[in-house]
Every structure is written in structure tokens, then in C-alpha cells.
Image (spheres, rainbow, N blue to C red):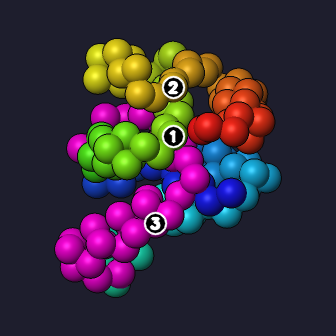
């Protein structure tokens, strides 16, 4: 399984350590194409990865070859919203995780969309349980 993990980069890196833990856990289910999202200093390493257009092209290629998108949406991000919208447009299943203790409310565009699934979590253990439930159901369904 190819997994595209989405999390805020330019919108704020406060959750980078959470992203790293989630990405490491997702590796139990397959290849995470966007492992770099969990790097604490991604802004420094991102600078050497090409122009904004090249980054967009690369990330869209990864997104379109993914079997599923897992997005951590506690920190609002224009890029993550864009990725979710593109995934929905291409019928790629999307699962969003949102921390109950986040200072931001979950967007109505996420909570109200019939085209994606989401779960609230309080801690990493609960997030992992939500991932397990989603991906086990995902793997067992034949019509993802």
C-alpha cells in the first residue's frame, strides 16, 4: 500500500513531532511517500528540493499514485486542504485526524464532507487506534 501523509509545512511546524510518530506508525501498513513531512527542520531541507512548481508537480505525482491519504488536520493548512480536495477529485480515499485539544476547530469542509472520513484523538495511542480501524477496514473493503 502506498500512503500519502499530509500535514502542515508552511502553515506551521508545531506538530512536526506528532507527524513523525504517525508516519513511523503508518510504515506498518506500507510505503509512506511523504516521510519528509515528519522532519522537524523541513523548511531548511525543502529549500533544496526545487521551485514551488517542482514541489507541486512531485507531490501531485505522489498523491495520484497513492492508495490512501492520511491527513493530520489539527493545524489549518492551505496545502493540506488543497491535497485533500485533489484526492477527493481523483477518488482517492482520505482519512483525517484531528486532535480534540487543538486550539483550532475542525473545519466544516472536513467534518461536513461525505467524501472523506475523519476521527478525533487525544493522544498518539488514540490516533494509532483510529488509523488501525480505518486502514483495516480499508484493506478489507474491495471497493475503497
Residue at the location (46% across, 66% down)?
Answer: 62
The spot of residue 65 in percent (x, y) is 50, 64
Residue at the location (68% across, 57% down)?
Answer: 1
The residue wearing badge 2 is 117
Whether the residues at callouts 3 and 2 have beta carbons within 8 Å, the answer is: no
Q: First in sequence: mark 2 or mark 1?
A: 1
Q: Please name whichever residue, 47 or 27, is drawn nearer the observer in this view of the structure.
A: 27
Q: Please name whichever residue, 54 or 125, is drawn nearer the observer in this view of the structure.
A: 54
The residue wearing badge 3 is 62
Vertical position of residue 49 compared to residue 27: above or below: below
Magenta extent: 49-78
Residue 9: image quadrant is bottom left
Few, some or many residues within 10 Å of mark 1 (<14, 14–19, 20+): some
**142 lies left or right of 20:** right
**10 lies left or right of 14:** left
The spot of residue 5 in percent (x, y) is 52, 51
Q: Nearer the viewer, mark 3 or mark 1?
A: 1
Q: Nearer the viewer, mark 2 or mark 1?
A: 1
Whether the residues at callouts 2 and 1 have beta carbons within 8 Å, the answer is: yes
Q: Quadrant of the C terminus?
A: top right
The residue wearing badge 1 is 93
Q: Secondary structure at mark 3?
A: helix
Residue 111: image quadrant is top left
Vertical position of residue 85 compared to residue 115: above or below: below
Residue at the location (37% across, 40% down)?
Answer: 88
Q: Please name whichever residue, 61 or 81, is drawn nearer the observer in this view of the structure.
A: 61
Amino acid at each position: 500500500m502506498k500512503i500519502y501523509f499530509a500535514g502542515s509545512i508552511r502553515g506551521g511546524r508545531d506538530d512536526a513531532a506528532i507527524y513523525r510518530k504517525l508516519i513511523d506508525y503508518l510504515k506498518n501498513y506500507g510505503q509512506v511517500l511523504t516521510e519528509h513531512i515528519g522532519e522537524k527542520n523541513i523548511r531548511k531541507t525543502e529549500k533544496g528540493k526545487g521551485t514551488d512548481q517542482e514541489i507541486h508537480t512531485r507531490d501531485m505525482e505522489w498523491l495520484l499514485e497513492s492508495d490512501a491519504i492520511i491527513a493530520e488536520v489539527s493545524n489549518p493548512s492551505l496545502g493540506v486542504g488543497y491535497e485533500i480536495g485533489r484526492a477527493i477529485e481523483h477518488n482517492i480515499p482520505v482519512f483525517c485526524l484531528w486532535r480534540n485539544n487543538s486550539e483550532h476547530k475542525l473545519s466544516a469542509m472536513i467534518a461536513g464532507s461525505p467524501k472523506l472520513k475523519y476521527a478525533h484523538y487525544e493522544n498518539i495511542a488514540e490516533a494509532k487506534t483510529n488509523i488501525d480501524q480505518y486502514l483495516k477496514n480499508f484493506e478489507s473493503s474491495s471497493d475503497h
